[in-house]
């Protein structure tokens, strides 16, 4: 079976028909090697290919693997731009330190993702809702079942064409409050993009799907009361409306992933004149606030999802609707303005890294 069956004869990927997140891979793979003796070496751009893994590969057995996710967009002059690659590179460094993996310099990270976009940009079809999603991966690659950090590691970057995580349109999502399991615990790995964080979320997501919901609302592990994340995304609550509106999001307490889109929305909200606050919010406050009208909008943020409105909430005991169940004006404004920046139609804040040829 070919590694990438979706490339047509015109060397452009077919536009995704419906949800196709993570399926329409591009042609190339960037790789770097690391050993304790040589450090980082052997950078290369190769055709996308299957990997040969020894059955005792450390990353497979002990989960010593971290990753990132960032996007490249087509600009008005048909060039390409990467959204905040340096911030993603710094976050990968934090993840690597937590998992005892080698720290990749940010300039090497940026060069690697730039090189892949340079090679495969022609495979991105024209379309305002499409982008290249890049997946950098760092894992322990040596062959040993000794319980110790890897001494040989690989860094890979692959890409695929995608539309929005929930489809091409900005539609409200329905979420399920999970009161049975926890995504993260104090002192754990909730604040890093560790591969194991995602496998442990599958059971809760399956439960949400069974309740006809799009995503899981994660609560704190101790009290099962405080809202932390929404699926693999950060979450914002809008209190009030118009000039009196206030955006509230849970604080980065070590359990919550410091999302690049979360940080971007906080900065963008300030540029647009919205007040912001970082504090804990309980499920009860969410429910009561929606009932009284104090909470007018709720949205989630992430690289894959962008800014996604929440319309309905379900739990084991109660269901409720956010506002009128449709995307609110502040969510819509933030979604639109962030997209304008990513598409090169707005220059402030200056977050776009223009892709140029690299050696």
Image (spheres, rainbow, N blue to C red):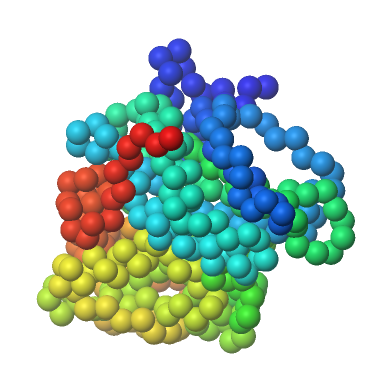
Report the quarter where the N terminus lies.
top right
Q: Quadrant of residue 208?
A: bottom right
Task: Give the residue furthest to the bottom.
Answer: 223
Quick one: which residue is furthest to the front in this view? 38
User: In this image, 26 relative to 129: left or right?
Assistant: right
**Number of labelled discs?**
0
Is 274 on the left-hand or right-hand side of 262? Answer: left
Residue at 67% across, 51% down: 38
Q: At 60% across and 67% down in the image, what residue appears?
A: 97
Q: Residue, x 61% and y 82% (percent of image)? A: 186
The reply, left or right, for residue 289 in relation to residue 212 is: left
Foreground pick, 141 / 326: 141
* Position above or below: 77 against 141: above
Residue 316 appears anywhere in the view: no
Up the image or down, 93 lies above or below 237; here it is above
Residue 71, given in percent of the width and then of the height, sits at 40, 46
Q: Image point 35% across, 67% down: which residue?
A: 263
Q: Quadrant of the rendered structure where residue 120 is? A: top left
Camera-side residue of 162 and 343: 343
**Nearer to us in this view, 218 or 34:** 34
Q: Position of residue 137 (x, y in %)?
A: 59, 49
């Amino acid at each position: 079976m070919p590694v990438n069956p979706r490339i047509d004869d015109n060397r452009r990927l077919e536009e995704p028909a419906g949800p196709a997140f993570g399926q329409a891979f591009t042609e190339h793979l960037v790789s770097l090697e690391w050993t304790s003796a040589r450090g980082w070496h052997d950078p290369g751009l190769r055709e996308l290919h299957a990997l040969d893994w020894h059955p005792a590969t450390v990353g497979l057995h002990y989960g010593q693997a971290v990753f990132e996710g960032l996007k490249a967009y087509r600009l008005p002059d048909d060039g390409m731009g990467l959204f905040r690659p340096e911030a993603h590179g710094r976050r990968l460094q934090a993840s690597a330190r937590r998992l005892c993996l080698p720290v990749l310099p940010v300039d090497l990270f940026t060069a690697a993702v730039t090189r892949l976009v340079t090679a495969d940009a022609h495979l991105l079809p024209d379309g305002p809702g499409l982008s290249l999603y890049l997946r950098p991966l760092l894992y322990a690659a040596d062959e040993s079942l000794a319980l110790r950090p890897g001494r040989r590691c690989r860094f890979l970057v692959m890409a695929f064409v995608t539309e929005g995580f929930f489809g091409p349109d900005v539609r409200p999502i329905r979420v399920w409050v999970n009161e049975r399991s926890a995504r993260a615990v104090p002192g754990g790995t909730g604040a890093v993009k560790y591969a194991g964080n995602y496998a442990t979320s599958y059971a809760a997501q399956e439960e949400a799907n069974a309740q006809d919901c799009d995503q899981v609302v994660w609560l704190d592990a101790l009290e099962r009361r405080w809202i932390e994340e929404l699926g693999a995304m950060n979450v914002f609550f809008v209190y009030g409306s118009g000039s009196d509106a206030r955006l509230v999001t849970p604080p980065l307490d070590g359990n919550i992933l410091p999302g690049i889109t979360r940080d971007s929305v906080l900065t963008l909200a300030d540029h647009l004149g919205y007040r912001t606050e970082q504090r804990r919010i309980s499920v009860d406050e969410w429910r009561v606030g929606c009932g009284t009208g104090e909470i007018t909008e709720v949205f989630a943020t992430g690289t894959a999802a962008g800014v996604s409105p929440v319309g309905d909430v379900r739990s084991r005991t109660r269901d409720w609707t956010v506002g009128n169940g449709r995307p609110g004006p502040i969510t819509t404004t933030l979604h639109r303005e962030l997209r304008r920046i990513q598409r090169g139609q707005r220059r402030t804040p200056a977050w776009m890294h223009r892709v140029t040829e690299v050696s």
